[in-house]
Amino acid sequence: MTIQYLLIVALLSLVAILAILLYVRIHREKRFASTLKAMNLEDFAAFLRSNSEDGTIQQVASKVSNLLKGSLGCERIIFLRKKRGLLELNYYHGITRFNRRDFRIKFSRQMTSQLRADFFPRPLEDLKTYLPAEFYHKITELGLDMVFPIYWRDNLYGIYFVRSSHKTDLKTFNMLIASVAQSLSAAYHIKWHETKYDDLQKKLTDISGQARQTDRAKETTIAALLKLIKQRKSDSLVSAIVELLNTELGMNNVAFMYESRSDGKAQLVFRGEGNRTLKIPSQASFDEVVAAIGSNSVVKIDNLAGKNNSLQTWARDFSQQGLKYVTALPLAPDRTAVLAWGGKPANSINRELDFLRAYAMDLLDNAESYEKIEELSYTDSLTRLSNQRYFHKRLEEEISRCKRYDRQLALIFFDLDDLKHVNDTYGHLAGDSILRQLGEILRQSIRSIDIVARYGGDEFCVIMPEADEDTCIRFMKRLKAEVNRSQFTADGVPDYINCTVSLGGAVFPDHADEAKKLIHLADMALLRAKEAGRDRCLLYEHQ
């Protein structure tokens, strides 16, 4: 009797524990769903889509304020903007009867280091050590309990202090705040770079005016550099510098060797007379040249070969292309570069070279930093694939190329067949995990010339240059099979999640002769595939 009683008690206890766990899970899911609904994700998605096009600080900051107040439920907001060593009140919402001087504080390197960990919001207490005691007391008195930074690289632009009515312990809430912060940070950074461009242009213009009466050669160099200030692409900038040296400074036959930003390998830009060509030197030769010429000296190439036997082949190749002199012209403190030329002797252009050295780094740093910002505006934050904006840009470019060379192009649209079921069953974070894994499958499945992008939600697209109908169908079947046999995982989900995709394709110019129509036809093929039962791939057929 005692054993039976103990078994019954144990069974009832187990049932009670399971009931409590089930209640907690249901309550958590309801809270999660209600929070997502309150956030109005459609407004948030529209903000991200438009931000890269309307990227001024005023426009993006206004959208951020509206999102914080509306979709993210921030009842009280204070934004302190960095200005001349201080953080000063720039925006507020939901607070009254205050003195602006109460919200002016000095910032320290320790505070900056603490904030630059990431864009995610964190409890105000995390900054207590770094904030003045009176300011901290004032902020807590107003009920503000979260903080997140606006920064880019080494630049801190400001700090948000907020209080939200939403459940702020959810990962989704934190991810949305981080995306908002990153978008505004990009806008501030773009403005910072525009200011650097303007300052550099003003400085060069002032120097040009001073040199006009006394130094015509210097004025010519400055005028040439002014043309380069608005260059946004680093590769184009390097080519423009070489063109400048070749044509405007009379350095006939110019070769510029430099380290690539992406992989550090030696690159070469050459402008020569007639049909002359020059091979990229080996990495070992490039390193030896850099070591041999020193920092700023100008060396005759023939003399350089005489000092180092291992450079004789390199020197002979360069001499045969009319190159006589070589000097260092670094593009960044940690990236070496070498300039070789013929024509004018070194002693006649030393001043121009010194002037170019002084500004080449600034020009390239501005161009490369701007490229990084642009790369971000073309990247989907969840999957790290290209986004819809980049897709439209590249599709127009590829179709123009097809028209020019009379070639074909395939466009494929596809999406997960039942992502809603995954979100409803396992939560939206599980759905996000699957989308990320699908992005990785895509990266490994495409050819090197293909362009893959996340179009929106669970819909993806692939641009396939040089692809006809047969190539398009083969790829769709292969991708469908790859997804079918993949075992997707998600945190908190003990079993593998199986997924399928539906795909639709169309080919230029067989089905459409312009981008907008090609998108429509590929999308219609996808719709037919889903209507036919899903887990299918269909090519558009003429009606």
Image (cartoon, rainbow, N blue to C red):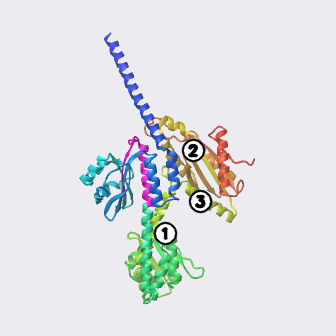
Q: Which residue is labeled 3 in the image?
A: 394
Q: Position of residue 108 (x, y in %)?
A: 28, 59
Q: Residues within 10 Å of mark 2 (few under 14, many from 20)?
A: some
Q: Which mark is residue 234?
A: 1
Specify start and end residues of the magenta stretch as a single range: 158-187
Relative to the observer, which residue lies in front, 504 or 57? 57
* Residue 65 located left or right of residue 269: left
Residue 183 falls left or right of residue 408: left
Circle 3 packing at 10 Å, graded few (<14), some (14-19), many (20+), is some
Secondary structure under tag 1 reads: helix
Q: Is residue 31 above or below residue 102?
A: above
Judging by the rendered image, the residue that carries numbered circle 2 is 482
* Direction right: furthest residue: 543
Task: Indicate the quadrant where residue 25 lies.
Answer: top left
Task: Report the residue at 32% width, 51% height from top.
Answer: 97
Instruction: Say which element carries label 2.
Output: helix
**Is 163 covered by the magenta stretch?**
yes
- Label 2 is placed on what type of residue? Glu
Q: Amino acid at mark 3?
A: Arg
Judge whether 434 appears above or below 154 on screen: above
Mark 2–mark 3 CB contact (< 8 Å): no
